[in-house]
Image (tube, rainbow, N blue to C red):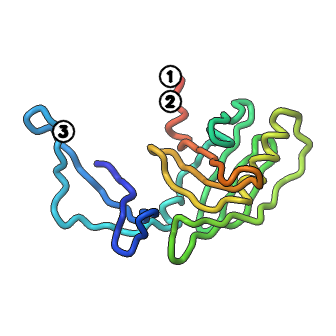
Amino acid sequence: MLEIITQGLGDAACCSTHKASKTYALQDGQLAETTPAGGKMVQVSAADLDGTNWSLLELADGQSASVSADATLNFAEGQVSGSGGCNSFTGSFSLGDNNPLVMAVGPLAATERACPDPVGSQESVYFVALNNVAHWGYEFGKLALYYGDGENSENRLLFAPQSSLSGAGS
């Protein structure tokens, strides 16, 4: 079974906001969709973000996060929390009423330990990026948070579910 984000009733052409489950099976040596007709689609919601712990992979498009800075992100009932790699943080988040892929994060509150570089400088960029998130989505099972940084029109924080990272080296 595969869960996808797809266009549903009322979605603008640019912005798919509905989830659908698709099933596939091998038939005569070919992969064929076997999803029953009339499959139900539901709109994505904040509840879809709850319950997964995310680890930061990329701080900006193509810029890998420092391995030594274990930056994380968690969502639970309208709240975000995690670590910038040195300091922990908490704050609120909300999704748009008309488009649930529109996201606002913050303000964030963080502990104030002095952090050596490169962790400290990466953490500062991470916290600013989180406070500027404008929308979110998934990219091949990874969480993408899109933000403006004042210079580029848009950048991306990319996260992997922590459970998928734990077995990566074994």
Q: Are marks 1 and 3 in contact (CB under 8 Å)?
A: no
Look at mark 2 in the image and give the residue it sits on: 167
Asked if residue 144 is positioned above or below residue 69 in the image, the reply reads: below
Element type where label 1 sits in the image = loop
How crowded pointer 1 is (Cα within 10 Å; few <14, some 14-19, many 20+) is rated as: few
Marked residue nearer the N-terminal end (1 or 3): 3
Q: Residue at x 67, y 43 (%)?
A: 60
Asked if residue 29 is positioned above or below residue 47 in the image, the reply reads: above
Residue lying at the far top of the rendered structure: 170
- The residue nearer to you, when weighing 79 against 106, is 106
**Quarter-of-image position of residue 68:** top right
Position of residue 83 measured from the top left corner of the image (x, y, whole percent)? 73, 47
Estimate the spatial distance between the alpha carbons at disc 1 and disc 2, rounded to whole Å. Answer: 5 Å
Label 3 is placed on what type of residue?
Leu
- The residue nearer to you, when weighing 153 against 101, is 153
Position of residue 28 measured from the top left corner of the image (x, y, whole percent)? 7, 35
Q: Nearer the viewer, mark 3 or mark 2?
A: 3
Label 2 is placed on what type of residue?
Gly
Marked residue nearer the N-terminal end (3 or 2): 3
Q: Residue at x 18, y 39 (%)?
A: 31
Element type where label 3 sits in the image = strand
Residue lying at the far right of the rendered structure: 114
How crowded pointer 2 is (Cα within 10 Å; few <14, some 14-19, many 20+) is rated as: few
Q: Indicate left or right for 103 with 4 as reference.
A: right
Label 1 is placed on what type of residue?
Ser
Instruction: In the rendered structure, find residue 31 and report the number of the disc placed on it.
Output: 3
Position of residue 170 measured from the top left corner of the image (x, y, whole percent)? 50, 22
Look at mark 1 in the image and give the residue it sits on: 170
